[in-house]
Amino acid sequence: MSKLYDVIIIGSGPAGLAAGLYAGRARLSTLIIEKDKDGGQIVQTAEIENYPGGLEEESGPTLIDRMSRQADHFGAEKVLDTIVDMELEGKEKILTGKKDTYRAKTVIIAAGASPVPIGCPGEKEFTGKGVSYCATCDAAFFEDFEVFVVGGGDSAVEEALYLTKFARKVTIIHRRDALRAAKSIQEKAFANKKIEFMWDSVVKELKGDGLLESMVVENVKTKELTEVTADEEDGTFGVFVFIGFKPESEVFQGKVEMEKGYIVTDPDMKTSVDGVFAAGDIRVKSLRQVVTAAADGAIAAVQAGKYIEENE
Ligand SMILES: Cc1cc2nc3c(=O)[nH]c(=O)nc-3n(C[C@H](O)[C@H](O)[C@H](O)COP(=O)(O)OP(=O)(O)OC[C@H]3O[C@@H](n4cnc5c(N)ncnc54)[C@H](O)[C@@H]3O)c2cc1C
């Protein structure tokens, strides 16, 4: 029979690694199960300016490398596997992976989420080099530049309004001829002189040489293609994509309480099931960032330790 861990953490993004560090340091036997490579979403970004203490040049991979080594240093074990099923009720939690089965007294779900991409050629290549999915993270890099926001829902229009504090001009590219955002948000956008609109339009391709320099936009009604190029002096522009955000929560459906696909927790990261905690982007929260994911992970690990003490 497999080892019974004190804590098993699903996911090794910032939330999972912080939980691993805190659990390991509290001398709890800890296993982090990750389906891909360490780091989660943040390894996609070449520059992080808003993680406290990171004034010097910091990239997603360098930050994650330190977080990962710190979790190792305090004894958290790691395994590469994908959790596909689980039994969470009862004192002993059983997690089924594609490769193995794991047992734990407590489980911390830190499986994260991810933005829905446009899915056009060039998008991957220019992520972090013009293409972004997070205005809070990247707006400051576009001070006085021109930016485009893809999407027409609440978050797209709210982020467009936020971007007007930095960018010279913000154009919302939307596939329909009317926004889906709440009326009050729409009114603010229509009243903002920095915001323009490209209706009935979708981005078909992103192009450039190292940095994003142009994009092809299609009018979905006329099928006409327009090439949008960067202002000559700027040399580049930003494309912020807000067409959805998907929690990695399918496998947890029916196991813990959820709201719109996100796991519901209390302020101590406790889910609806005893001994099961959730941390980071996968839970219902108002700000999805590395700093909040790490904080969630720390709280979840401390609470997992308390749960074990109280239940032994
Ligand atoms: C391009 C980009 C740039 C960003 N820039 C910034 C920034 O500058 N500053 C900032 O603060 N935030 C930034 N963010 C947001 C930040 O990355 C997230 O808030 C943070 O990564 C959330 O951490 P997490 O640990 O909750 O989840 P994630 O980072 O999503 O990690 C979850 C991990 O769980 C694993 N996993 C999922 N399901 C399973 C399973 N069934 N079994 C095993 N493993 C599983 C995944 O493979 C993943 O590694 C950015 C996000 C993106 C996409």
Image: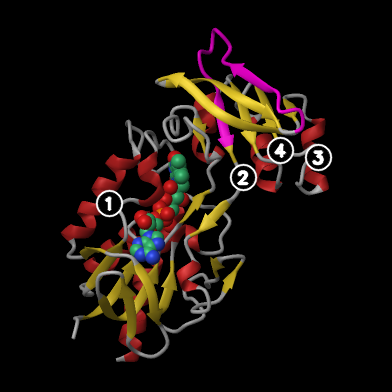
Nearer to us of marks 2 and 1 is 2
Dot 2 surroundings within 10 Å: few (below 14), some, or many (20 or more)?
A: some
Instruction: Kindly tell me whether residue 290 is visible in this rendering.
Output: no
Residue at mark 1 = 67
- x, y percent for residue 202: 65, 33
Q: What amino acid does circle 2 point to?
A: Ile
Instruction: Kindly tell me whether residue 233 is visible in this rendering.
Output: yes
Give the residue displayed 33% in from the left and 35% down from the top. Answer: 58
Dot 4 surroundings within 10 Å: few (below 14), some, or many (20 or more)?
A: many
- x, y percent for residue 291: 43, 51
Residue at mark 4 = 175
Pick the quarter of the image with the N terminus.
bottom left
Instruction: Tell me if 86 is positioned left or right of 227 in this view.
Output: left
Residue at mark 2 = 243
Give the residue displayed 70% in from the left and 23% down from the top. Answer: 224
Q: Is residue 121 above or below residue 157?
A: above
Front in this rendered view, residue 22 or 271: 271
